[in-house]
Image (cartoon, grey):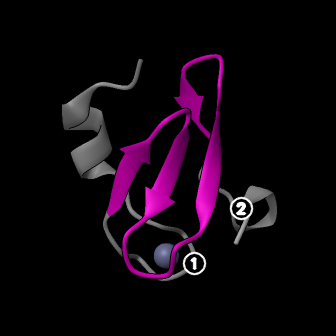
Amino acid sequence: MIDAKLLALLACPACQGDVGLQGEKIVCRQCGRKYPILDGIPVLLVDSAEK
Ligand SMILES: [Zn+2]
């Protein structure tokens, strides 16, 4: 599980928007990209994002 404080420090690499947790993914509130979480580590790479 991702820590809420860690989540607050993260930003979308594509648009620098705020991100939130949605199920097993990190979702950008601004552009809607979804980033995977692998072994508890958010993978905030534009290349691994889903739109
Ligand atoms: Zn974004």
Q: Which numbered disc covers residue 31? A: none
Q: Which residue is mark 1?
A: 14
Task: Based on the picture, tell me whether residue 42 belongs to the magenta stretch.
Answer: yes
Q: Quadrant of residue 45?
A: bottom right
Q: Which stretch appears magenta?
A: 19-43
Question: Could you tell whether 48 is left or right of 38 in the image?
Answer: right
Give the overall secondary structure of the magenta segment. strand
Task: Based on the picture, tell me whether residue 40 belongs to the magenta stretch.
Answer: yes
Q: Quadrant of the N terminus?
A: top left
Against 4, is 28 above or below? below
Label 1 Cα crowd, 10 Å radius (few <14 / some 14-19 / many 20+): some
Mark 2 or mark 1: which comes first in sequence?
A: 1
Question: Could you tell whether 51 is left or right of 5 in the image?
Answer: right
Residue at image location 65% in from the left, 16% down from the top: 39
Label 1 within 8 A of ligand 1 by Cβ: yes
Asked whether 13 or 29 is in front, the reply is 29
Q: Are marks 2 and 1 in contact (CB under 8 Å)?
A: yes
Q: Indicate which label's residue lies in the foreground, 2 or 1.
A: 2
Rendered location of residue 27, percent (x, y): 48, 57
Count of numbered tags: 2
Against 7, is 31 above or below? below
The amino acid beneath tag 2 is Ala
Q: Which numbered disc covers residue 49? A: 2
